Image (cartoon, helix red, strand yellow):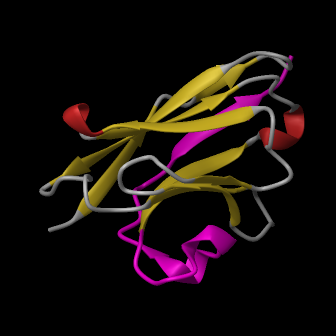
């Protein structure tokens, strides 16, 4: 069964940093474009960033461009999301997912599947 596992969330002060990891259980990530999303209470899931299977292409939502960096280490079967200059509005559950349809650069939830269970990120003083 294909399943992604997110980790690295936690409580951080405004202006701080966190690195999230996305690993896989039961399959290798090498062939997949991976996306990061988040969902805050009462809000729709928001696409943040995605990276192509070999890491040659990356895309970011305007809300995180310049603050978040996506990367991958296929040897470790892991995709990362480095988050800097965190703001209280970044508080959400963060998910990773595999692209299942073309057009994944649009960062729409419908183009992704095999969602992980999510990891909570809380930005607060």
Q: Quadrant of residue 120?
A: top right
Above or below 90: residue 39 = below
Q: How many marks do you count on the picture? A: 0
Evaluate whether residue 98 shows in this view: yes
Identify the residue at horizontal 27%, vertical 40% (top origin): 74
Above or below 85: residue 59 = below
Identify the residue at horizontal 21%, vertical 66% (top origin): 2
Q: In which quarter of the image is residue 66?
A: top right
> Which residue sits furthest front?
56
Identify the residue at horizontal 78%, vertical 28% (top origin): 123
97 lies left or right of 81: left
Evaluate whether residue 107 shows in this view: no
Q: Position of residue 60 (x, y in %)?
A: 71, 52
In the picture, the quarter occupied by the N terminus is bottom left
Above or below 98: residue 40 = above
Identify the residue at horizontal 44%, vertical 62% (top origin): 97
Answer whether residue 102 is magenta in the image.
yes
Q: Position of residue 65 (x, y in %)?
A: 80, 43
In the picture, the quarter occupied by the C terminus is top right
Nearest the eye: 10 or 61: 61
5 lies left or right of 65: left
**The residue stretch that appears in magenta:** 99-125
Q: Where is residue 35 in the image (x, y as percent from the top left)?
A: 52, 58
Q: Where is residue 111 in the image (x, y as percent from the top left)?
A: 52, 80
Above or below 82: residue 112 = below
Answer whether residue 44 is magenta in the image.
no
Q: In which quarter of the image is residue 34?
A: bottom left
């Amino acid at each position: 069964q294909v399943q992604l596992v997110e980790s690295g969330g936690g409580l951080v002060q405004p202006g701080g940093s966190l690195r999230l990891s996305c690993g896989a259980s039961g399959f290798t990530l090498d062939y997949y474009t991976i996306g990061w999303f988040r969902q805050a209470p009462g809000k729709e899931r928001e696409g943040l960033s995605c990276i192509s299977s070999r890491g040659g292409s990356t895309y970011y939502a305007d809300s995180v461009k310049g603050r978040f960096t996506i990367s991958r280490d296929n040897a470790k079967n892991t995709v990362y999301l480095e988050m800097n200059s965190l703001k209280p509005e970044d508080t959400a559950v963060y998910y990773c997912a595999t692209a299942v349809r073309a057009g994944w650069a649009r960062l729409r939830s419908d183009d992704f599947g095999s969602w992980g269970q999510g990891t909570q990120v809380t930005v607060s003083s």
